[in-house]
Amino acid sequence: MPIRSAGVLIPLFSLRSRADLGRGEIMDLPAMAEFARGAGLTIIQLLPLDEGAPGETSPYSAMSVLAIDPVYISARGLLGVGRATLARGRAKVGATRVVPRAIYRPAKLAILERAFRAARGRGLGGDFDRFFERNRGWLDDYALFRSLKDRFNWTAWDRWPTDIAHREPSTLAAARHELADSILKYAWWQFAAERQWRAARAEANRRGVMIGGDMAFSPARDSAEVWANQEVFDLERTVGAPPDAFNRRGQRWGLPLPRWDAMRENGFRLWKARARRAGAMFDLVRIDHVVGIYRTFSFGPDPDADGSFSPTEEHEQIAQGEEIMRALLAAAPGCRLVAEDLGSVPDWVRGSLMRLEIPGYKVMQWEREGWNSPDERFKSPATYPELSLATTGTHDTEALAVWWRDQPRAEREKLCAALAISQRVNAKSDRLKTDALDAIIEALYAAPSRYVIVPIQDLFGWSARINRPGTINDSNWTYRLPLTLERLSANPGIIARLARLRAIAERTGRGGA
């Protein structure tokens, strides 16, 4: 990977192709890589691919942090899946641009069920056997957990019969025997996902494009990993964020609190397994909520009680964070890590990341000097450290065009001054025109930052957003490209836009080889 790289942030579910069934799929990645190269980009940064529960839309609350969500498997080319099957699947999901997960998921899994039956009829083969053995450490528990979720009609595992919930060995052995066919199906789906992933990543790499992954902070309480590792989670406490100017009571995320002492006793086994898995899949991995690895804020069951940090002392927090981060680096030696260090993060966390040589984030709109003072101003991207990832936003923020529109003229003028583009950009206009957008992108690309990864909306001046924090409904986490990749790649306006972006990347030394 070039030391100065430019990339695009886009969730896998946001991709569109003529062959997909209503959501982005693994085999859409090569076309996205070709599209990215047209803009001079060498990284595609994704959100977590972890499997979510049927009603869960956020990729950061996973039913498994080790399994790829089967809905990402591309149906085309699977044994037993012909044109008629695909046509029936498309009829079920409809022709709308955004398909609710509640409609899409069962239609897609029905197709995958058919593919599994066809594959099993021919014999799953040695490649599957080798995959299962190579991944047995997590796949055994995951496939059993998924089968038990079906058996118990999707009730949470802590409401299952006690001997199953508490993993009594003889009961688990009996369940594995009784559910052998279902277990095999869920394992085969993971095999099919990995086989496609390897092919798609290889195609992207061949085009000079790296694939970035995202490691969510923790599995959901009702997940395969928490069920299989109950001794290293405190199920009485829920992870969240401390009170701040935006949330007087703090935020409760519903994730179980890691018992860091117990995790240390077993050598951070689960975290290492996650890092190995990520390292095998991705060229670069974003560690979400990295401050939580150093110190985790959590709440107890009393809704009126204050939360607290674990560990409590700063020296313990530093020692713990660096111990875990070193373990992740060692478990994924060929993969580059990036730390999401946004929000209320103590300065010493960023100092620690610098010592570990792990880049943190620089969100252009949030990088300021003299906060809340008359002299408050944006920092020039020219001052960003080389060990950083610069961007115009994340999956949680509004698009740059919307941010620009909503700012008072004085703020827009301050940004232009910091970027040294005042002579080129009309800050009076609340519409972010193409020339202004390009000037902003070029100033960011020119930063010393090792990586610049920009949300796809901001590369094109689009206004849609990926996530509205605190919003739970079927329309959130559903953003999709306005056109299929085939149509975008043939659109004269888009072709011209890609050429402009490629020229910016080349002028700033980020165009790749």
Image (cartoon, helix red, strand yellow):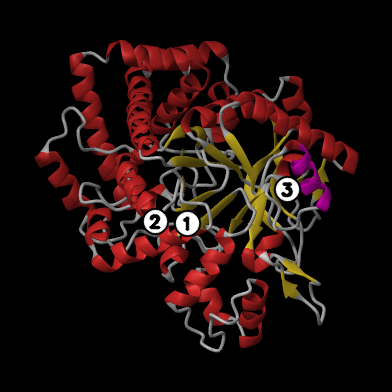
Left or right: residue 30 compared with residue 440:
left
User: Relative to 430, does residue 230 appear above or below in the rendering?
Assistant: above
- Identify the image quadrant of residue 356: top right
Report the residue marked by disc 1: 505
Callouts 3 and 1 close, C-beta under 8 Å: no
The percent position of residue 285, horizontal first and vertical second, equals 56, 39
Foreground tag (3 vs 2): 2
Cα–Cα gap, marks 3 and 1: 51 Å
User: Relative to 91, does residue 67 appear above or below in the rendering?
Assistant: above
Q: Main secondary structure of the magenta part?
A: helix
Residue type marked 2? Ala
Cα–Cα gap, marks 3 and 2: 50 Å
Cα–Cα gap, marks 2 and 1: 8 Å
Report the residue marked by disc 3: 301
Callouts 3 and 2 close, C-beta under 8 Å: no
Give the mark nearer the N terminus: 2 vs 1.
Answer: 2
Secondary element at image label 2 = loop
Visible in this render: residue 313? no
Front residue of 400/91: it is 400
Residue type marked 3? Pro
Report the residue marked by disc 2: 39
The percent position of residue 418, horizontal first and vertical second, equals 67, 73
